[in-house]
Image (tube, rainbow, N blue to C red):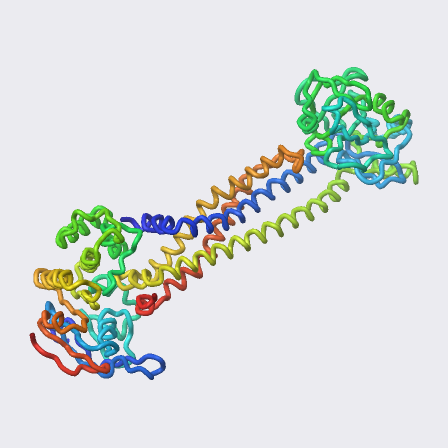
Amino acid sequence: MKFRDLIIKNIFRNKSRSILTVIGIAIGVAAVVGLGLVTDNLSASTQNALTAGAADFSVVSGTSNGNNGGGPPGGSNQLINQTYVSEIQQISGVSSTAGVLRTMTDLSNTNSTNSSSTSTNNTFGGGNFRSMTTLIGIDNSSLSMDDVVITNGSVYSNDNEVIIGKNAAQSLNKTIGENISISNQTFKVVGIYETGNFMDDNGIVMSLSKLQNLTGDTGQVSLVLVKASNDTDASNLASTIEAKYPNQLSTSTSLSGMNRMNNGLDVIKSGSWAVSLLAVLVGGIVVLVTMMKAVSERTREIGVLRAIGWSQKRILSMIIGESLVLSLIAIVVGLAIGIGLVELLSTTQILQGITPSFSASLILKGIGVALFLGIIGGIYPAYRASRLSPTEALRYE
Amino acid sequence: MNNENIIEIKDLKKTYENGVIKALDGINLEIKKGESVSIIGPSGSGKSTLLNMIGALDKADEGSINVAGIDLMQENDLSDFRLNEIGFVFQLHNLIPNLTVLENVQTPLIETVISNKKMEERALKILKSVNLADKINQKPTKLSGGERQRVAIARALVNHPSIILADEPTGALDSKTQDVILDLLLDIHKQENVTLIMVTHEHDVANKAERSIYVLDGKIKEIKKN
């Protein structure tokens, strides 16, 4: 009989205790991996949205707080006159511009009732946030400036056609060739797009003029996307524009937008780490208590093993070995729970739009947590067991 | 140390509870290689403490104790000594319940460097010698008291120790099984020329050994040849 066979046999000796230990460690692994999958996705999504865009910055109303650097609309939604699009295009150093109108609407009942009500600026931010769909109006020739990439189908060619984001397609259960009703008007879905931004991917894009017509905002846009010439510094250009239109326009660069988003993400990440830490702590205590119990129940047996010639080191190795094998089982269980749960929730309303972001480092973190818990939880009971006096252990009832 | 002696104990003292209980109070004893000795005395007389001192399970406060050439008062880690020189048989067999008979007998060998195959061969040979060849895959819970004690004896012998220390080896058995186990221990002692030291409180058992040592209040009161 090999030493490792004895360790494995000992684990299956008290199945309920072993299962409890595995669950304790698996909770820690699942928390670290599960929350990591979500926060990593948010981070990747934000970076995609803010750094990969063709536009260098956006121009918004000087009275709004400007938060439209390709990211999700938020805060004020003050509109500006569409004439700024062509005016800014004339400024030296500007390569191209595009006017964009953004709004949100609740289309959650559209599928069943085949009717909907498009929200206007006045209703922006109201209702159930998770069920809101972003409506984006932009000329089809400028889609790349707003990071829109068609993954299936084609771009809209007239006012009766729209393209929908991959998450919206999923939540509204629509695909290419089907009709979608917005504000009592029917549009044909001609393409599915992806931006890497979970808010925009839960949106519908149509021509600027059509959205203006739907919302009654003719001649107005939410923002102007600006791309600087290759030889022009985008930050300087943004300053020039702000100087030219004081109190009228302000600019929002991808960088500043990213900083703001990163600050928000840092808070989310800190929160997820705090939850993970708590789960790890609970897992550690469960392992410690169950291993202490395991050692206590086997005190007499440990005394016998010492009497027949086992060294303290061998006893230590046996208990830590048992703890580590339980950790290895917990790694599989924890990863399955963590990944499975996020995968499951990402298909529901709870984590709509979140695509789990797998990475080797995250899996390694999960494995690290399990091994850490196994060693920490096992080391004290193992130390105590190895230090037991053989005569006292043999007297133990 | 005399070459004929495997154990030499001089003025050995051991107290518990800060000196309140004198478990051993100046023991002097010599035991020859291959001898069978019984230690007899009432409960609390110090006989088990003496056995534990010889088996290096506990350390004395004063005196000297030399077993198989090792000064037990000087060495700190005596697990190797127990592994190579001592075979313990307890009153309650103390087998590991989730292991089979064969695996239980192999447990001391885990600490050695011998191969898995040789481990099994050695354990099987000893189990045959104690007439348990047909029970090797059974768990201890399925065995009778006598069978369990035979497994414990096989476990004590698997490392070819020079001394077998048996603490009340027949104490938990009925009289018929008691004789079988006692005869087995004495047979092994003769065939293997292994030193046998048995602790008992029964005179019938004690008289089967070559010498009986009567212990009372931590002192040797009488040594007699049987």
> Looking at the picture, how far across and down is residue B202, in whole percent?
16, 72
Residue visible at 17% across and 74% down in the picture: B39
Q: Is residue A28 left or right of residue B164?
A: right
The residue under the point 23% across, 64% down is B90
Q: How many marks?
A: 0
On the picture, is A284 further left or further right than A182? left
User: Which residue is more in the foreground, A162 or B209?
Assistant: B209
Quadrant including the C terminus of chain A: bottom left
Query: Which quadrant of the figure has residue B161?
Result: bottom left
| Residue B181 image offset from top left, x and y in percent | 14, 61
Residue A217 % position (x, y): 89, 27
Q: Is residue A274 above or below residue A198?
A: below
Residue B185 in the image: above or below residue A24: below
Q: Nearer the viewer, residue A280 or B212?
A: B212
Q: Residue at x 74, y 27 (%)?
A: A109
Instruction: From the viewer's perspective, tell me whether residue A194 is left or right of residue A228.
Output: left
Name which quarter of the figure residue A189 lies in. Answer: top right
Q: Is residue A235 visible?
A: no
On the question of residue A247 being in view, the answer is yes
Q: Is residue B87 left or right of A277 when viewed as pictured?
A: left
Q: Nearer the viewer, residue B157 or B32?
A: B157
